[in-house]
Amino acid sequence: MFEPDLFPISVGVANVRHYQDKMLHLPKYVTQASEFAGFSELAKLLLQK
């Protein structure tokens, strides 16, 4: 899902860490917050730029 060759810039919300032992690839960036709050964190960051 977060294969770096296919998705060099990837973002996951914090709860992705709960599954890291089952995943082949982790996102390059992980938010501090989980679920919707993590998405909101990312959206606010992108809107600031």
Image (tube, helix red, strand yellow):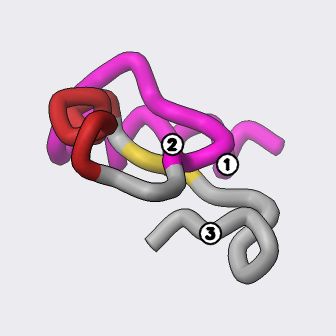
> Residue 3 shows which numbered tag?
3
Separation of residues labelled 2 and 3 (CA atoms)? 20 Å
Please name whichever residue, 30 or 4, is drawn nearer the observer in this view of the structure. Answer: 4
Disc 3 residue type (three-letter): Glu
In magenta segment, residue 17:
no
Element class at badge 1: helix
Query: Which region shows up in magenta?
Result: 26-49
Is 27 placed left or right of 1 in the picture? right
Residue behind mark 2: 42
Separation of residues labelled 1 and 3 (CA atoms)? 22 Å
Q: Which of the marked residues, 2 or 3, is nearer the chain's N terminus?
A: 3
Element class at badge 2: helix
Residue behind mark 1: 46
Query: Mark 1 Cα within 10 Å, few/some/many (few <14, many 20+)?
Result: few
Disc 2 residue type (three-letter): Leu
Could you tell me which residue is drawn at 44 percent across and 72 percent down?
A: 1
Q: Is residue 46 above or below residue 6?
A: above
Q: Nearer the viewer, mark 2 or mark 3?
A: 3
Image position, residue 42 (x, y; %): 51, 42
Is 47 placed left or right of 5 in the picture? left
Could you tell me which residue is drawn at 72 percent across and 38 percent down?
A: 48
Disc 1 residue type (three-letter): Leu
Separation of residues labelled 2 and 1 (CA atoms)? 6 Å
Q: How many marks?
A: 3
Image position, residue 13 (x, y; %): 34, 40
Could you tell me which residue is drawn at 53 percent across and 40 percent down?
A: 44
Q: Which of the marked residues, 1 or 3, is nearer the chain's N terminus?
A: 3
Are the residues flagged by discs 2 and 1 in contact, CB closer than 8 Å?
yes
Q: Is residue 22 above or below residue 34?
A: below
Is 28 placed left or right of 15 in the picture? right
> Residue 37 shows which numbered tag?
none
Q: Is residue 7 above or below residue 31?
A: below
